[in-house]
Amino acid sequence: METATYKKIIVSGIKGLPTETLREIADFVYFVRRRAVDPKSFEDEQFRALVTEDLSNLNETESEHLEAEFADYESVYPRR
């Protein structure tokens, strides 16, 4: 299928949809564009989001242990 055909399908498919649904579609378009245009940045952002989510699920003891584990990380493993 050609690009113009896809565009027509998309435009006709969103006509008459409620605002909330259009907002979801816009979010999805933004997501797909970011992934296609700048995959490395997208991958980094996705990784940070997953790590942040994992860290938010730690309890206080686990968090303290993790902080101690990485206390001198920058000096032990300097960036090159």
Image: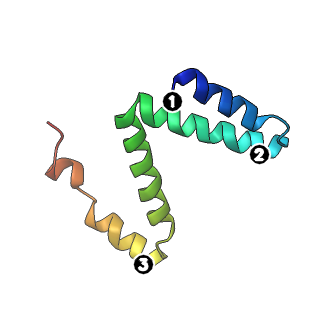
Residue that numbered label 2 is attached to: 21
Q: Amino acid at mark 3?
A: Thr
Badge 2 element: helix
Residue that numbered label 3 is attached to: 61
For image coordinates 40% across by 30% down, the residue present is: 38
Q: Quadrant of the C terminus?
A: top left
In this rendering, position of residue 4 left or right of residue 74? right
- How far, Cα to Cα, is label 3 from label 1? 56 Å
Residue that numbered label 1 is attached to: 1
Labels 3 and 1 touching (C-beta < 8 A): no
Q: Residue furthest top?
A: 4
Q: Earlier in the sequence, mark 3 or mark 2?
A: 2
Foreground label between 1 and 2: 1
Using the image, determine if residue 65 lies above or below residue 38. Answer: below
Using the image, determine if residue 2 lies above or below residue 34. Answer: above
- How far, Cα to Cα, is label 3 from label 2? 42 Å
Instruction: Kindly identify which numbered label has been placed on residue 41.
Output: none
Q: Residues within 10 Å of mark 1 (few under 14, many from 20)?
A: few
Q: Nearer the viewer, residue 37 or 15?
A: 15
In this rendering, position of residue 8 left or right of residue 77? right
Q: Earlier in the sequence, mark 3 or mark 1?
A: 1
Badge 3 element: helix
Labels 3 and 2 touching (C-beta < 8 A): no
Residue 35, image x, y percentages:
44, 37
For image coordinates 41% across by 70% down, the residue present is: 63
